[in-house]
Amino acid sequence: MGVRVNMDLWLVTLLNALVWGLLWALLALGLSLIYGTLRALNLAHGAFYMLGALLSWALTPTLSFWGAILAAPAIVGLMGVGLARLLWGKREHDSLTALLLTFGIMLILQQLATIFLQTTTGSLRHSVVSPLRWPIPVGDRFYEGYRLIVAAIAGGVLAGFWGLWSRTRWGCALRAVCDNRALARVVGIPVLWAQAGAFGVGAALAALAGALVGPITREVSPTMGVEVVLVSVLIAVAGGLGSLGGAFAVAFFYSFAENLLTAFADPMLARAGALLAIGLILLIRPQGVGGE
Amino acid sequence: MKRWAVIAALLAAGLLPWLWDRALLWGIDLFIWGLMALSLNLLYGYTGLLSLGQGVYFALGAYGAAWAVIYNINFWGALGAGLLCACVGALLVGWVSVRASGYGFVVVTLVTAFICYLLALSADSLTGGEDGMSFTSPALTVPGLVLSVRDLPVRYYFAMGAFLVGLGVVSRVAKSPLGLAFRAVRDDEIAAAFVGYNTFAIKLFSFVLSGVLAGLAGAIWALSKEFVRAGLFQPFGAFLSAQPDPDPLIAVLLGGAGRLLGPLVGAGILLGLREFFVGVWPQGYALAMGGALIVLVRVLRRP
């Protein structure tokens, strides 16, 4: 009997690792895409994630949850396009300037969300109800079916993105901008719009992750993105900035490491351990797993 | 001429609390956060290394002092313990992080800060966790005098003294051949290595010195607040509170990176802005900082 219970626990842990791996992949992929096209490490990524969660929470009463998780990433994505056009415009920024710009965006978005919540609801933390109750029996335990749907959605979006990236003309244009901006301009690719588009897509992916996470963490708040951006930045860097495959691989590695460690240690130690493990990857391969 | 300006500024800073008592509290914050920004200026302004995890050494300084006080060590011992903790921490992190360049360095400092924060949270018997722990600062004993940091004027002059020590260190270093080496690494690391500088040692030294100065600021902060909490380690932690303390990076950029008094000016502007917004529109302060950051980096050149 004891062995059986343990097996169930392992199965739940592995399922969690899969779900979170896909979510981290959504986040790290966006970061990597933004770095590839704009040469900017986007510290505002956590703010986009937070906005996604917050917007989907705010829109759920009018649009239903499923409408809200479509609308929230669309809004944040458009905002990302606007921000990129506004701040990058014709100027090229060196990498540290770009980093500081995104730091400024993060502060402003986080504070706007705080002000919005304070003035409309008077409270900064709000609980989120799961859109469906579908407990799946796993041995003697139950697994939330909603998490499997999250995995399916995230996996579908990642696969769809992969198709666009590798099979279509738009993906080809983006890859060209990543490789060589000057040459891309010469062959007639509107580089500024491609960069803004990539920023928007990255922001929308982060917002989708946030919108999907809301019912898992059961809470939204303006500061929920602060820790998330740190982890996803490390994943994207260890994956090799600009390398989407690397980001994907390290996201899964991180998620499995963290979730398996949670079985032995408290969540904070588990997270610290998983971060250290990725740090080791960087020590061995400073350019990241998929970096050149 | 320059000497007279320095003497006048020192006299003004020394006499101000007697003329206007509100300046006491304000000045204590200004010197502590000015010292913190000064430490980052040494690293970013002079050596060109952008660290987003400077809060770790502030926190280590604070915790080193707090732990020493809990073990009944006297005031100067506690201050020394804070500096030692910050120094060891900076040496360990610097050993790894300064090997990375550009983004690598930013990310390593950011993530070590995050890991330290998680460890501090989980070791809550040692650190007090998120709630923190309070203690009673021992008396400040100078030969012939026994003072208490609870007295605001004592705290003011002590913070001012520590800031002046930090300022002296940075200005001496900036003028020395070592300071030239820092700037050589900042402007072109490959060229600096090519003419024979050991860039690893130079960057590590800058990192550790900057960490020790941040630790000094942290130790003074802890000894005067008589309180420490794990949140001090948290990267971007200041921005999670409603009334954020001056962020050293924004202070350095505001005052001018690579300028000796820039950090003090920047910290002063941030404290002034906070004071202004508290009366008018408290939530506006963080918006103003974010806006200032965007405008600053779009307008200004890098150091």
Image (spheres, coloured by chain):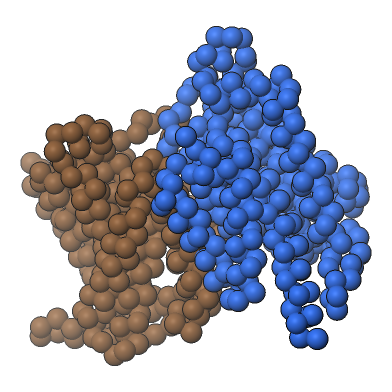
Chain colours: A blue, B brown
Give the camera-side residue of A24 and A39: A24
The image shows residue B7, relative to residue B122, as above or below, that is above
Q: Picture quarter containing residue A72?
A: top right
Q: In the image as oriented, which residue stretches furthest toward the bottom?
A: B72
Q: Picture quarter containing residue A28?
A: top right
**Is residue A71 found left or right of B132 in the rendered image?**
right
Give the camera-side residue of A44 and A264: A264
The image shows residue B127, relative to residue B186, as above or below, that is below
> What x and y, as percent, mark residue A41?
51, 40
> What x and y, as percent, mark residue B186?
26, 38
Counting labels gives: 0
**Is residue B217 found left or right of A229 in the rendered image?**
left
Give the camera-side residue of B259 and A128: A128
> What x and y, as percent, mark residue A83?
62, 32
**Is residue A288 found left or right of B2 in the rendered image?**
right
- The residue under the point 40% across, 60% down is B55
Give the position of the C terminus of chain B as an image quadrant.
Answer: top left
Q: Is residue A99 visible?
A: yes
Give the position of the N terminus of chain B as an image quadrant.
Answer: top left
- The residue under the point 68% across, 54% down is A21
Q: Picture quarter containing residue B10?
A: bottom left
> What x and y, as percent, mark residue B181?
16, 41
Q: Is residue A115 visible?
A: no
- The residue under the point 21% across, 79% down is B76
- The residue under the point 22% across, 65% down is B162
